[in-house]
Amino acid sequence: MAPVSSGVTQSPDPNLLVATGLCKCFGGIHAVDHAEISVARNSITGLIGPNGAGKTTLFNLLCNFIPPDQGRVIFDGEPISHLPPHQVALQGLLRTFQVPRVLSRLSVLENMLLAAPRQTGEQFWNSWLKPLRIRQEEQELRQRAWHLLESVGLAAKANDYAGALSGGQRKLLEMARVMMHRPRLVLLDEPAAGVNPTLINQICEYILQWNQQDGVTFLIIEHNMDVIMSLCHHIWVLAEGKNLANGSPSEIQTNPDVLRAYLGQ
C-alpha cells in the first residue's frame, strides 16, 4: 500500500549556499581556518574583513578554484567540493575577480557570447545535424547579449576590443558576462574597487536590479562600507581566516569585535 501523504509540503532550504569547517593552509599560513558561511536564497550577503583576512581565498574555496584542506560546501542542497570549477559554474554558481578577467583580443560582444553555457554549436556534429537550431540559438544569445550590454551602458562599445575598455568598464563587462550564464548565485569580489563614485552607484543599481527582478543571489566582498551597508541583508565578518561575527548591517556596525578588528577602534 502506498504511504498516505500528510498533506504537509516541506519548504526548501532557505539557504542556497552553506559552507562549514573550511580550512586552507599555504605552508604554515592558515589562510582560512575552520570558516563557515551561509547565503540565503534571493539575498544580497556581504563578506568583509581586514586585508589578509582570507576573503578571496574563501571565495576560491566556495567555487573550488582551489580545493579545501578540510570542510564542505553545499550548493542548493548538493555537495560541490568534488566538482571542477567549470562544473560548479554549470550548477549556477559563478564569480567575478578583484581584477576583471576579460578576453582582451576579442570584442566586447564576443566576450558576452562566449559566456553562454551549453550552446548547441559546441558539439562538432551539431554543425551538420542541427544547423537551424544553432542559428536560432545564436540569434537569441545575441539579443540577450545586446540587452545586457545596453542595461550596463556598454552597447556603444560592443564592437570594440575588450582590452580597450577602462578598468570600470571591464568590471561592468565581467558582471554582464556572468549574467549571460543566467546564474543563481554570483560571488562578486570587490566590485567597487578602483571605480569612481558615479560608477559605484550604477553598479549598486545593477546588483539590486538583478537581485529583485531576476532573483539572482549575491555574495559580495567589499571594503567600501557604504556599498555593503546599503546593499546587504546579512553580513559575515572574517579576520585572520576565522569567523569573527555575522548579522544584520546594524548589528555589524555596532559590534565591538568588528570595530576593533576591521575599523581599528
Image (cartoon, rainbow, N blue to C red):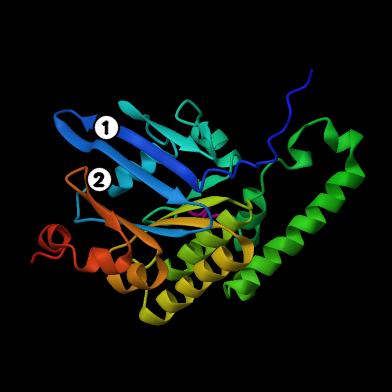
Q: Position of residue 219 (x, y in %)?
A: 42, 54
Above or below residue 183? Residue 265 is: below
Determine the main secondary structure of the stretch shown in magenta.
loop
The single residue placed furthest to the top in the displayed view is: 1
Question: Which residue lies at the image location 57% right of the left edge and 72% below the top edge?
Answer: 152
Residue closest to the eye, 117 or 223: 223
Label 1 neighbour load within 10 Å: few <14, some 14-19, many 20+: many
In this figure, which residue is indicated by the disc labeled 2? Answer: 54
Callout 2 environment at 10 Å: few (<14), some (14 to 19), or many (20+)? many
Q: Say which residue appears at 60% left-offset and 60% top-offset.
A: 215
Q: Residue at x 37, y 33 (%)?
A: 66
Q: Is residue 3 left or right of residue 11?
A: right
Q: At x 64% / y 66%, what residue is drawn?
A: 148
Q: Can residue 90 be seen in this view?
A: yes
- Disc 1 residue type? Lys
The residue nearer to you, when weighing 164 against 15, is 15
Residues in magenta, as a range: 101-105
For numbered disc 1, what is the local secondary structure? strand
CA distance for labels 1 and 2: 9 Å
Towards the viewer: 247 or 56? 247
The image shows residue 153 at horizontal and vertical percentages of: 58, 75
Residue 24: mark? 1
